[in-house]
Amino acid sequence: MEKKIAGVTIECVGGDIASQVGFAAVVNAANAQLRTGGGVAGAIHRAAGPGLEREAIKQAPIRPGQAVITGGHNLPNPYVIHCLGPVYGVDKPGDKLLASCYRNALKLAEENNIDSIAFPAISTGIFGYPMREAAEVAFKTILEEGPKLQHVKRIRFVLHSDRDLAVHEEALDRL
Ligand code: AR6
């Protein structure tokens, strides 16, 4: 499903964040060291090849809520924006830190003339953030930032299961 807000198309799809052809940037649910990992980080680094980690680690460590940008290496996308989400119940306030991830990722996209960006559900895997709450934070932040965006015209959420996709579609529908 998709929705248009302030000239920006927001959509939710099921799939793999590492195979988003046609998007200028994909977002990595990173670790502080910007190294490969499990989940999204594993998929992105595997598809990008070892050059991604070599480039990314020069900007490490990052703090929860922060984002940094690198090239996409062997991914179908010119850029990767790496966000460190909060560990649920540990990095506080979790909602503010998660919102910062989305805000800072969009800021970097704007600074780099990026017109399309695909996000995974940051923090909702190993970091334990409840899916529904995370989706609310993500869309609320995008709603706030949407009117300020000059370059970003398309924002996609890539969800890994049908259930996660349904949760995001409901949250987007409520916007
Ligand atoms: N494409 C889209 N979504 C995915 C994919 C994929 N290929 N794989 C998993 N997901 P996670 P986090 C979903 O754990 O919670 C890493 O190891 C997954 O089902 O990747 O921010 C890093 O190194 C979940 O809903 O990110 C960090 O240490 C969501 O993506 C840590 O995990 C995020 O899951 C970051 O944890």
Image (cartoon, helix red, strand yellow):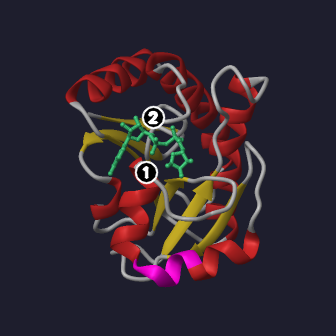
Q: Name the one closer to the observer, 113 or 25.
A: 25
Q: Secondary structure at mark 1?
A: loop
Quarter of the figure that contains the N terminus: top left
Q: From the viewer's perspective, tell me whether residue 80 is left or right of residue 118.
A: right
Tell me if I can see residue 159 in this picture. Answer: yes
Label number found at residue 38? 1
Q: Name the one closer to the observer, 147 or 155.
A: 155
Question: In the rendered view, would you say 9 is above or below 139?
Answer: below
Label number found at residue 139? none
Q: Which residues are magenta?
A: 49-53
| Disc 2 + disc 1, Cβ < 8 Å | yes
Q: Residue at x 43, y 45 (%)?
A: 120
How far, Cα to Cα, is label 2 from label 1? 9 Å
Q: Secondary structure at mark 2?
A: loop
Tell me if I can see residue 118 in this picture. Answer: no
The percent coordinates of residue 108 (x first, y second) are 68, 62
Front disc: 2 or 1: 1
Q: Name the one closer to the observer, 84 or 79.
A: 84
Q: Residue at x 48, y 31 (%)?
A: 124
The percent coordinates of residue 155 (x first, y second) are 45, 49
Total marks shown come to 2
Label 1 CA crowd tier, 10 Å (few <14, some 14–19, many 20+): some
Question: In the rendered view, would you say 42 is above or below 142?
Answer: below
Q: Residue farthest to the left?
A: 162
- Disc 2 residue: CB within 8 Å of ligand 1: yes
- Disc 1 residue: CB within 8 Å of ligand 1: yes
In magenta segment, residue 67: no
Q: Residue at x 34, y 20 (%)?
A: 167
Q: Amino acid at mark 1?
A: Gly
**Mark 2 lies on residue:** 125
Label 2 CA crowd tier, 10 Å (few <14, some 14–19, many 20+): some
